[in-house]
Image: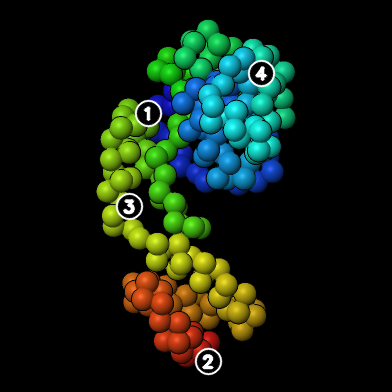
Amino acid sequence: MAGQGVEYPIFLDLRNRKCVVVGGGTVAERKVLGLLAARAHVLVIAPLVSESLEGLAADRRIHLVRRDFRPGDVEGAALAFAATDTSPVNDKVVRAADENRVPVNRADSAGGGDFTVPSTLRRGGFQVAVSTGGASPAYAQIVRRHLEDVLGPEHGGMVAYLARLRPQVMARFPDSPARRKAVWDLLVNWETVDLVRRERWDELDRKVRACLS
């Protein structure tokens, strides 16, 4: 397991990349759902899987192989997850991932993985990840639930609005990073977030026009 307090936080773009989950229970389900949210290509390997995973396979949202894990299964993967309740199997997955230089997450407490999976709050394109370095996933979850009450859907709306606005700012000041930064300094603030929350789009447009002028 990654050392407590020494991880390097990072968000990975896993779109259309192979990720391997070994295991078929509730822990594997959580890993799979997170990977699907990231639009990864998910390969699940287990002789027996839960009804939920069966349903995902039937809907062709995951590729399910109903057998025991083989070391070659992780070849070409971006990430691997040892998510069984059997330590020797998880050992085998970790060894295979190490040999193939694939970062691996180990779900049990035996250690040996390269990274932990944070408890994540998603609001559209806005994400907040909470980690305790594997010391207490339960504590990370209660902090995330607290943040759900604090950070509402307007933050996803803010990110979507700024994503649409970015090409306009770039086109208006293509050769002036300083001017672009000045625009963002004026626009990216809590006042704008509040306008998005209240859906005051006319006021937002006026604010943007003033900044771009």
Q: Residues within 10 Å of mark 2 (few under 14, many from 20)?
A: few
The picture quadrant where one finds residue 67 is top right
In the picture of the structure, the residue carrying the numbered disc 1 is: 134
Q: How is the image coloured?
A: rainbow
Mark 1 secondary-structure assignment: loop
Asked whether the beta carbons under mark 1 and mark 3 sit within 8 Å of each other, the answer is no
How far apart, in angstroms, are the residues tagged by discs 1 and 3?
21 Å
Residue 26 spot, x, y in % from top left: 46, 26
Residue 130 spot, x, y in % from top left: 37, 42
Give left or right: position of 198 versus 207. left
Mark 3 secondary-structure assignment: helix
How far apart, in angstroms, are the residues tagged by discs 4 and 2?
61 Å
Q: Amino acid at mark 4?
A: Arg
Give the residue drawn at x 72%, y 18%: 72
Give the residue drawn at x 61%, y 84%: 172
How far apart, in angstroms, are the residues tagged by discs 3 and 4?
37 Å
N-terminal label among 1 and 4: 4
How far apart, in angstroms, are the residues tagged by discs 2 and 3?
37 Å
The picture quadrant where one finds residue 207 is bottom left
N-terminal label among 2 and 3: 3
Q: Is residue 17 above or below residue 146?
A: above
In the picture of the structure, the residue carrying the numbered disc 4 is: 66
Q: Amino acid at mark 3?
A: Glu
Q: Residues within 10 Å of mark 4 (few under 14, many from 20)?
A: few
Give the residue drawn at x 32%, y 38%: 140
